Amino acid sequence: MLKNISTGSSTLSRYILAEQRNYPEASGDFTIILEQIAFAAKLIGREVNKAGIANIVGSLASSNIHGETQQKLDVFANTNVIQALDHLGLLSGMASEEIEDIIPIPDKYPTGKYLAVFDPLDGSSNIDVNVTIGTIFGIFKKLGEPGDACPADFLQKGRTLVCAGYVIYGSSTMFVYSTGCGVNGFTLDPSVGEFILSHPDIMIPEHGKIYSANEGNFEKWSPEIQKYITDLRNNKERTYSARYIGSLVADFHRNLLKGGVFLYPGDKKNPKGKLRLLYEAMPLAFIIEQAGGRAVDGVTDILDIMPDDIHQRVPLIIGSKNEVDMFMRYVSGG
Ligand code: FBP
C-alpha cells in the first residue's frame, strides 16, 4: 500500500494521484480516465439501485451482437461509459461487449494514445431479480501510429494491459482496479458521493475453499472437468463449498476476497465457453494475477492469449493459485 494513505480517508482520486507520483514520467492521463469511469459507475449504480421502482428493468426489443436480448440498463450503462470517455482526448477508440464494431472517437474530439475495452453491465440477465452485477474494463496503449483506432489495434495480449478494473453494484458499490502495482478496492460512500479506500492491497488466498461453476452444465463437460469438480466435492483434506451467483463480477469478487476458483469451461457444443476474452476474461485475469492468483483457459494463461477477434469467447478458470493449478493438472493429465 502507498505510504501516507490510510483506509477510510483516501478517496479514489487521491489514491490515483499518489500512485501517479511514483512515476515521474506519468502524465496524469490515468487519473482522468479512472475518474471518468468512476463517474460513469456512480450514474450506473444510481440507476441499478432504483431499478425496481423506475421503468428501467426489463428488456428492450433490440438485441446485442451476441443475439442476447439487451436489458434497458445494459444500454444505459453502455451509453454512459462511452460518454464518460469519448471526449477526453486520451483515447483513440473503444470496444464494448454490447457493440459489434469498435467505437470511434467522435470527429469533434481529439484522439489519444489509449484504448478502452469494457463490458458495461456484466451479469445483466440478473437485473430483474436484484442480483449483484458489475462493469468490467481494461485499458491498453495503442501500438503504432497515433490517431483513430482500427479493430486490429485491440488485438493485443492481456499482458499489455496498462490498467484493468471492475465496479460491483452490490449491497454497496465498489470500484476495484490495478495499474500493475497491486489491487485496491474503494467503496462508494453515497452520503458524499466518493469512492473511499476500503480494501487496500487485496491478495487472494493461495488456497481457496469455494468453487463456482454452473453445475447445470456438468453433463456437457469433458470427463477431466467432471472429475475435477467431483474431486473437489469429495475432497478429504479440504472442505469445498459450491457458490455460484451466475454473475461473473459477483462470483469473481467473492472469490478474490475469500479465495476460491470460478470456472466457465468450454463444452462440446461451445468449446470456447461463454465469456468474452477482451471484455471479461482479460481484465479479471490482470486483476487476479496482481492479487497473486491465476487465470487460464485450460491450456494457456489468459493474459498470454492473442485474440483474433474483438468479440472472441474463451473458457475461463480463475481464482486461487492452488485450485487453478490443480485444474491444469487434471486437464493436462498431469
Ligand atoms: P451476460 O454478459 O449476458 O450477462 O453474460 C455473462 C454472464 O452473466 C456472467 O456474468 C456469468 O458468469 C455467466 O454469464 C453466467 O452464465 P450461465 O447462466 O450460463 O451460468
Image (tube, rainbow, N blue to C red):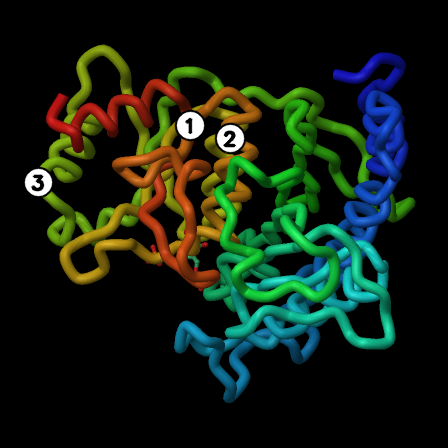
Q: Residues within 10 Å of mark 1 (few under 14, many from 20)?
A: many
In the displayed structure image, the side of residue 101 where residue 331 appears, left or right? left
The furthest residue to the front: 145
Q: Residue 294 shows which numbered tag?
A: 1
Position above or below: 289 against 84: above
The image position of residue 295, as x and y in percent, is 40, 33
**Amino acid at the residue labelled 2:** Ile
Disc 3 residue crowd, few under 14, some 14–19, many 20+, Cα 10 Å: few
Q: Identify which residue is drawn at 82% across, 34% down.
A: 196
Tag 1: amino acid: Arg
Dots 2, 1 in contact, CB < 8 A: yes
Label 3, label 1: how many angstroms apart (C-alpha)? 23 Å
The residue identified by callout 3 is: 223
- Which residue carries the number 2 mark? 288
Q: Quadrant of residue 171?
A: top right
The residue shown at (19%, 19%) is: 235
**Quadrant location of residue 6?**
top right
